[in-house]
Amino acid sequence: MKRKDMTQPPPGDGKLFGEALDLCIHLQNDPANPIVRELVQRWRALDPAREAVWAEVVEIHGMAGKVITDRHRAIRARAATTRRNVMLGAAGLVAAGLGAALGPRAVTRLRADQVTATGEIRDVQLADGTMAMLGPDSAMRSDFTADRRRVELLSGMAYFAVAEDAGRPFQGIVGDLSATALGTAFEIGGDAGYLTVAVERGEIEIGIPHAPDERLGPGAWLAWDSDTGRIARGERNPGQVAAWRSGIIIADGEPLSSVIARIYRWQTGRVVIAEPDFGARRVSGVFDVHNPILALEAVLQPHGGKLHRISPWLSVVSTI
């Protein structure tokens, strides 16, 4: 197993902070769920450091709206009315809707049998001999039986060099999109509801709800926006498939929200987009994530977007 770490390690409490933020969000989304409440209590009781980080997260989570509102007041003298409304909307989003924007990441990771940290790329050999590469801040689980091989990407991105086994098709799942192959190499990914698959060699069969199955050959890629139902297709050099393995992100008419979420897998902390319409804008380009902040600026600048750091672990994207 080989591990590549493309970022500096986060501060000592960074991992605990991320876990606590996930639990706080999940508790906010489902406060009456006794399982969630017990999970939080057990996590806090593990050691004093967790209890201290929990208190910090609760405070920051509650202050998020105030921080953005204060930023709004500072620029009110020069901001137009539309910009003021956007910032007020950002305050509401971060204070009340952060959970919906980020999702219960901690719970997702509990379902996985392979996970990676921020900026980490890991090689994994699966039980059938398939070589997988799991992208940064990603999670997957596998289910192999006598007659099938199934790997579900729970978050992030993954590349598979599939071991041949004619009697057991290999199926990669991300969301409601499936990619089935016998012997091939391909990648799948999912960020902000934008699900992608691309073939390096061989052929795969794609399954999408309410759409006919189709086959993709070397260099072909397909993207499905599960929120809008839009399907995009294209061709690229097979050598560019899973370019993230070398620290490169390639976007081709992709929603800005998806590109931001993918780049942020190389950056410690979480990011939320304050204006949903802004996140729906389309982006094309090649971005170097060896320096994720510069990559984010390159994505945002043509659209007038800005990145606001609320804390080392939480950032907000807006147009003001």
Image (tube, grey):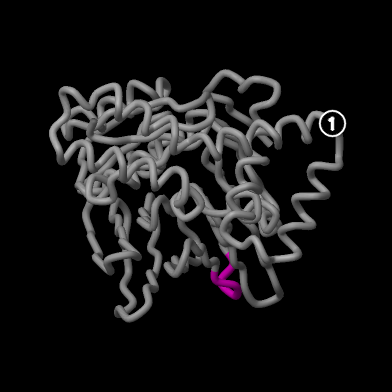
Q: Where is residue 218 in the image (x, y as percent from the top left)?
A: 32, 54
Residue drawn 34% across the image and 28% down it: 307
Residue 179 in which image quadrant: bottom left
Please provide the residue range marked out in magenta.
165-169
Of residues 46 and 184, the one nearer the viewer is: 46
Residue at x 48%, y 36% (from the top left corner): 64
Determine whether, in the image, residue 76 is placed left or right of residue 25. Answer: left
How many C-alpha atoms fall within 10 Å of the one at disc 1: few (<14), some, or many (≥20)? few
In this view of the protein, can residue 226 be seen by the observer? Answer: yes
Residue 55 pos. (x, y %):
70, 34
- Reply above or below: 171 against 239: below
Magenta: main secondary structure equals: loop
Q: Is residue 245 magenta?
A: no
Question: Please, what is the three-letter code of the amino acid marked with disc 1?
Answer: Pro
Q: In the rendered view, does 140 fall on the left or right side of 160? A: right
User: Which residue is nearer to you in this view: 28 or 257?
Assistant: 28
Say which residue label 1 marks.
Answer: 48
Quarter of the image with the N terminus in it: top right
Q: Can you say which quadrant of the picture contains the C terminus?
A: top left
* Left or right relative to 243: residue 151: right
- SS under mark 1: helix
Q: In this view, does 229 lie above or below 63?
A: below
Is residue 186 in view?
no
Residue found at x 44% / y 38%: 65
Q: Is residue 166 found inside the magenta-colored segment of the image?
A: yes
91 on left or right of 110: left
Write the residue at 44% across / 51% down. Answer: 101
Quarter of the figure with residue 177: bottom left
Tally the marks: 1
Residue 187, x across and y down, in percent:
44, 51
